[in-house]
Image (cartoon, rainbow, N blue to C red):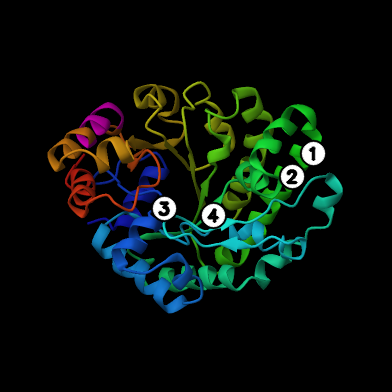
Amino acid sequence: MMTPRETVLKAFEGGKPERVPVTLFGGGMWSIKDYGTSFEELSHNTDKMVDMCVTEAEKIKSDVIYVGSGFNNFHAAALGKEFGAGIKYREIGAPDMTVHFVHSEEDIDKLNKQDLFKDPVIKTVMDATLRVNEKIGNKYLVTMTCWGPFTLAARFVGEEIFMKYTFKKPAFVEKMVDFCADLLITLYEPLVSAGLEAISIADPTASGDLINPKQMARFAVPPLRKMSDWAKSKGVHTILHICGNTGDRIEQFIDTGCSTIFFDQKVDIAKAKEVLFGKMSFGGNVAPVHVLLNKTKEEVEQACREVIEIAGKDGGFILVPGCDIPPTISYENLRAFHDVALNWKY
């Protein structure tokens, strides 16, 4: 019998495993609430972060375990400490960055990628990733999360001004996203060297609701390709999720070189299969709020079956929510979501 890890890796390669692969994307907020801790408490407690990930992995039964889900803003804040950037913890939700601090190409040149490793929270998450991988990496596919280069760049600069710069200062935007790709490669290098098999990228600012296909091709695809080419050279998979409706640029995901793309619920999953099947694995796209949060267990099961019937019967597919899930989804509904796939034999 294939392990969860083997099941999802087979799908990444376009194959048909023994059953339909299934995973959350991230799941940090839900796991933290269920485990009874907080982002702030975990940020300085590696043992607790490891125990939470291992405990929740066995409870949730996703094929992929995302260590550090919700801690992505630290990768920018770590480089901004001397510019006054900090992190603010919230009662509900992921920690946020306090200020944006890159305004020019000269500012980019002042940034030091090695500052990543001076941040104690980044060290906690990285250490936890390796320890979780040692404990359960033979069963589950263990990864660590990050923002995609376009989203991370916007965190440095400020989302609204960054969007304007795609028109007014395109050379600056290109330099910034390329720097962020290199920064993320720097971040993952020691983890990959120590045996991590996948990197996990969320690039919500590259959403179809925010940038058009032309902007996507110029500013978001090249840095993703840089990261995935690097990962591929190390024998490592790249998981990508982009929020919003990207139905008008599905073929561009092939250009990213990523192993798989997880689609938002706004994307027509039948069209996604039509474009990608045989070229790239893909996942989707059960609505996290409309279905997983607000529907009954039976309605969740029906929605999952519908997605698999449309897109998942021929392999190369992973059942995934359309985005990260709210922390208030019932365990019963989450269990139902997973069980449909866990029991769906090809």
**Residue in the picture at 17% in, 51% down:** 332
Q: Earlier in the sequence, mark 2 or mark 4?
A: 2
**Residue in the picture at 74% in, 44% down:** 176
Callout 4–callout 1 Cβ contact below 8 Å:
no
User: Seen in the image, is 214 located left or right of residue 259?
Assistant: right
SS for tag 1? helix
* Residue type pointed to by label 2: Met
Q: Which residues are magenta?
A: 304-311
User: Seen in the image, is 210 located left or right of residue 178?
Assistant: left
Q: Name the residue that disc number 4 marks.
A: 235
- The one nearer the camera, 35 or 305, is 35
Q: Position of residue 317 (x, y in %)?
A: 34, 38
Residue 59 lies in quadrant: bottom left
Q: CA distance from mark 1 to mark 3?
A: 30 Å
Name the quarter where the N terminus is drawn: bottom left
SS for tag 4? loop
Q: Name the residue that disc number 3 marks.
A: 26
Q: Name the residue that disc number 1 marks.
A: 172
Q: Earlier in the sequence, mark 3 or mark 4?
A: 3
* Residue type pointed to by label 1: Phe
Which of pointers 4 and 1 indicates the residue nearer the eye? Answer: 1
Residue 13 lies in quadrant: top left
Callout 3–callout 2 Cβ contact below 8 Å:
no
Q: Position of residue 204 (x, y in %)?
A: 53, 40
Q: Earlier in the sequence, mark 1 or mark 3?
A: 3
Which of pointers 3 and 4 indicates the residue nearer the eye? Answer: 3
Above or below, 43 relative to 28: below
User: Seen in the image, is 70 located left or right of residue 310?
Assistant: right
Callout 3–callout 4 Cβ contact below 8 Å:
no
Q: CA distance from mark 2 to mark 1?
A: 6 Å
Q: Name the residue that disc number 2 marks.
A: 176
